[in-house]
Amino acid sequence: MTSKTVFQNAFKTFLDFAINSLPSTQGGLNITATAPGGVGQRPFTNKAGVLKLIFVSASSLYIGGLIAHKGASYLEENEIFVPTDEDDDD
């Protein structure tokens, strides 16, 4: 066999295994429905969502600023980048 047919057979075997390993519903689909126009259950809400957003944003900004500060200090200390103090206000 050529390498192309070996690859095709291996790929077909893999696909058959993947398709057959999917869970199947023996008794049909389990779908819960309400009457037309009926009101379903209240969806899940995360009560601390805004607090988590503020915490993650603030901590990310702080850590990013700290990394930038340390990087700038390293560059200036090793004289890789030294800002000039020239004033062009003439």
Image: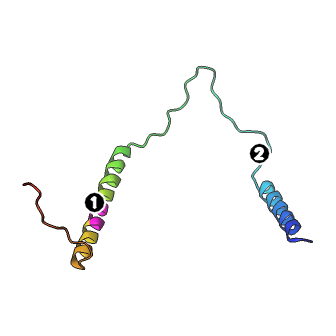
Residue labelled with disc 1: 62
Amino acid at circle 2: Thr
Q: Which residue is mark 2?
A: 25
State the image coordinates of residue 76 (x, y, percent, origin top left): 22, 74
Prevailing SS of the magenta stretch = helix
Give coordinates of residue 32: x percent, y percent. 66, 33
Q: Which mark is residue 77?
A: none
- Is there CB contact under 8 Å for labels 1 and 2? no
Let me know if residue 11 is in the magenta part.
no
Other residues around mark 2 within 10 Å, as few (<14) / some (14–19) / many (≥20): few
The quarter of the displayed image where residue 73 is located:
bottom left
Foreground of the two, 88 or 30: 88
Which picture quadrant has residue 77? bottom left
How far is mark 1 from mark 2, CA to CA? 50 Å
Q: Nearer the viewer, residue 66 or 1?
A: 1
What residue is at 42 percent from the left and 43 percent from the top?
Answer: 46
State the SS at label 1: helix
1 in relation to 24, above or below: below
In the image, taking residue 55 as reference, residue 82 lies left or right, namely left
Give the residues in magenta: 62-68
